[in-house]
Image (cartoon, rainbow, N blue to C red):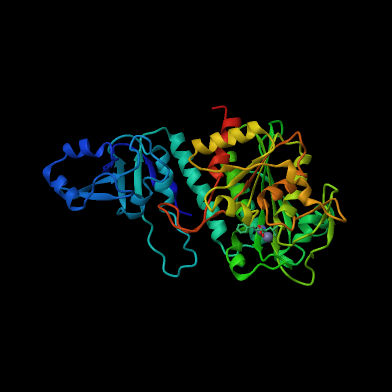
Amino acid sequence: MTDFASLLVPDRGQKARAIHLVDKGTFGDWAKGRGADDRSLLVAHRFDGKTGYASVILPRGGGIEVVSAVANASSLSPWCLARLAETLPEGSYKLAQGEPGKAALGWLLAQHRFDIFHSKKEPERGARILVTGEAARIDEAVRLAEATALVRDLVNTPAGDLGPAQLEQAVRDQASRFDAEVRVTSGAALNEGYPLIAAVGAAATRERAPRLIEAEWGNPAHPRVAIIGKGVCFDSGGLDLKNATGMRLMKKDMGGAAHALALFNLVAAERWPVRLHLLIPAVENAVSGAAYRPGDVVKSRKGLTVEIDNTDAEGRLILADALDRAAEGKPELIVDFATLTGAARIALGPELPALFANNDELLEGFEAAAREADDPLWRMPLWDGYDDMLKSDIADIANATGSQMAGCITAALFLRRFVPREVAWAHLDMFAWRSKARPGRPKGGDALGLRAAFALLSRRYSGR
Ligand code: BES
Ligand code: ZN
Ligand code: ZN
């Protein structure tokens, strides 16, 4: 993992190259204060303060300064320094005015790469930025970068290298940093206690066998918060097999689990007064003679019988047993993350997680937190009117509707059946993937909604 802490360092008067941030409003005045050489260089580069991510390097004796155009120089976005951090030569830098603030995150993440499979590694970028803010702010930016990089790395790791056993190991590695207790349920105990998780994972054996991974952290006397993540290490669709295009990215179907683990880390590191309960049902939705079948009926942990309409609607099945387990602990709040439906992507595209929640205050809090964290998501309805689409002829409920309509809503309504009414519950149906690279955000696995969820928990529990 990139050593982010070495790239965001306290300003103790070290030598550093200045970065001037301008926008289309401030560029004119700023340029007036420059010498003739600077001005002709800017003209030669057609730098006018407007162009998206443009920047120009200004010679200063033996050294350099940098001028870069941002959308709004007085309110920096998390990503407005990312392009610079990707391109500037190694060394120390400092904003000529103000502090990087939120933009520290993009500065850091721009220097992280997933390169474990490249035989020839590029050298570390090593662009350091100086900050005068309090140490706590630096730590938080570093931890957010680490959490995001953890999500990216886990999602990018191919399914062949990251099955349920490796996902379990990833949870154990992280939990040990916080002395969190880890419990893993598999084999006969899984068949007995978590029939839906066992059914979805039945086709995968040995080290790829299904399991429920749990971790707990914090004082049991504090309010309990359950964080759940869909951990489908590969989603072939099962017997309702996906086609080649549909299957191509399905190593990322454990993206929810990666988000849940990263959020658990972020909160435990803050030591807020909460009792965290992390639940990751980890399976591979595979094909074999032992696979669960369309038409099978499985009695869930909660006792509701579920008819399998489609083996590719596996995420909601494993989450159902996990939600029921989480509810047993009488949490004050449950948040789940899942790459649950293609329908959510058709509705909102790759960048906006669909947010569902069973109470309005939680919805509003989440939306406000998302704005605060510059981590957008969009509200979707738990529309009661569609509940009967999940009717089964022979069981209490079916896992899919057989209709193309409102797929992410009916998936969320399925989950709601497993959540007690009195427990506040939020569900994020997300993509966990970036299809097109942007500064600081390479193509591949990505955290979407993680900072929003962290900001939500901060509003509720940090006491700030
Ligand atoms: N993991 C997929 C959902 C998915 C697909 C997320 C593509 C992101 C991109 C999920 O398990 C699935 O296959 N859902 C089906 C449900 C359907 C069979 C009811 C879907 O959305 O098509
Ligand atoms: Zn599926
Ligand atoms: Zn899936």
Residue 405, above or below 157: above
Classify residue 77 by image quadrant: top left
Image quarter for ligand 2 equals: bottom right
Residue at 72% in and 66% down: 238
Where residue 257 appears, x then y in whole percent?
63, 52
Vertical arrangement, residue 165 with respect to residue 366, above or below: below
Q: Give residue 219's position: percent from left, percent from top.
A: 68, 34
Please give the name of the residue rendered at 79% of the width and 72% of the height, measured from the top-left corner: 289
Q: Nearest the camera: 41 or 89? A: 41
Q: Report the residue that reaches farthest toward the left.
A: 36
Residue located at (69% from left, 68% from top): 241
Q: Is residue 30 above or below residue 431?
A: above
Residue sitting at the far bottom = 289
Task: Judge whether 275 appears above or below 441 on screen.
Answer: above
Query: Whole-percent x and y of residue 323?
Result: 74, 45
Residue 440 position within the rendered picture, expressed as x and y whole percent measured from the top left = 42, 52
Picture mark count: 0
> Residue 21's quadrant in the figure?
top left
Image-based side of 342 in relation to 402, left or right: left
Q: Residue furthest right?
A: 394
Which quarter of the image is occupied by the C terminus?
Answer: top right
Camera-nearest residue between 346 and 190: 346
| Front position in the image: 285 or 118 | 285
Please give left or right for residue 133 compared with residue 23 in the image: right
Regarding residue 331, the answer to whether it shows in the image is yes
